[in-house]
Amino acid sequence: MKQSKVSMLGMPYLHFGNGNPLVLIHGLGEVKEGWQSQFELADQCELIIPDLRGHGQCTKTEGITIPNFASDIIALLNELKIENAHILGLSMGGAVAQEIYRQAPHLVRSLMLISTFHFFPKIIRTPLFEFKKLRLSVAATDDAIKETAAHMSLYSWSEENLNHFKRYFQPKRDIFLKSLNACFQVNNISLLPTIKVPTLIIGCQYDSVLPVWIQYCMHKMIPHSNFIILRNSGHLAKLEATSRFNLLIRKFLNRIAGG
């Protein structure tokens, strides 16, 4: 396993590879090591993979908000003296990626928004939050929480996929709920039409967490964005469709490099 570093502001991160910088931002309840299947991208990218505030090895637990998640990564990029980077975010990480563009568009060379969202209508925020809260409260053990989340997130429930998911999905109940609530505060309806960098949006055919129509709506709002549906995958294509997912990322990056 790659050795973790810690930024001056206390953000643990992985940093390795050669090429243009690529930031990989994990989703709700995940940890940076969950990108292990994408470590192969280090042969063409300088990978920067952080633990978001309150997640993984990050002991900083106050101020759980999408803007703070984004500002932490911006501070890390500045600390590393990176002028601009490709920003890839999965699920909640995709909302963080959008917020990085809002706060520091000059740092964003391209956006890759994977199985993510830009807005939750008010009418569904409260019932969805209460439902998630109830699911957490009735799950007696951490393993029960992981089992429930795995069956929501995965299309293929093979033993290998389940074990991989449980290894890198490590929710802390209080942080999980605060982060979920932070997601419900996101409203990027006015931001998306202003995005001017190359943008790849990937949705997954059988995503029951953030259905593919949400990513389609984002595609229609971001000028000149590319939209791809990965078939036969649930919420976590990086795990269930690793080869296809990594190839799509490589092709997108190569196209940008080729101008």
Image (spheres, helix red, strand yellow):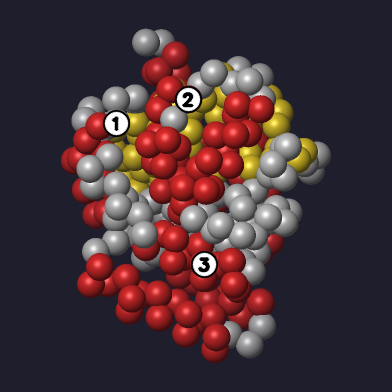
The one nearer the camera, 89 or 71, is 71
- In the picture of the structure, the residue carrying the numbered disc 3 is 178
Is residue 37 visible to the viewer in this orientation of the structure? Answer: no
Secondary structure, mark 3, is helix
Q: Is residue 87 above or below residue 208?
A: above
Instruction: For the N terminus, give its image quadrant.
Output: top right
Q: Which residue in the protein does label 1 denote?
A: 195
Residue 254 appears in view: yes
Residue situated furthest top in the rendering: 259
Pinpoint residue 51: horizontal percent, then vertical percent.
64, 48
The quadrant in which the C terminus is found is: top left
Residue 212 appears left or right of 70: left
Q: Is residue 51 left or right of residue 64?
A: right
Give the answer, above or below, for where 62 lies relative to 51: below
Classify mark 1: residues with Cα within 10 Å, few (<14), some (14-19) or many (20+).
many
Query: Real-space Cα distance between discs 3 and 1?
Result: 28 Å
Instruction: Give, as a three-letter code, the residue at label 3.
Output: Lys
Dot 1 or dot 2: first in sequence order is 2
- Residue 208 sits in which quadrant? bottom left
Task: Identify the residue at horizontal 44%, vertical 61% (top origin).
Answer: 182
Mark 3 burial class by Cα count in 10 Å: few <14, some 14-19, many 20+: some
Please report the residue visible at 66 percent of the width from the left and 27 percent of the height from the top.
79
Which residue lies under the disc numbered 2? 107
Q: Position of residue 87 (x, y in %)?
A: 48, 33
The answer to whether marks 1 and 2 mark residues whose Cβ atoms lie closer than 8 Å is: no
Determine the secondary structure under disc 2: helix
Mark 3 vs 2: CB contact within 8 A = no
Question: What's the CA distance linking mark 1 and mark 2?
Answer: 13 Å
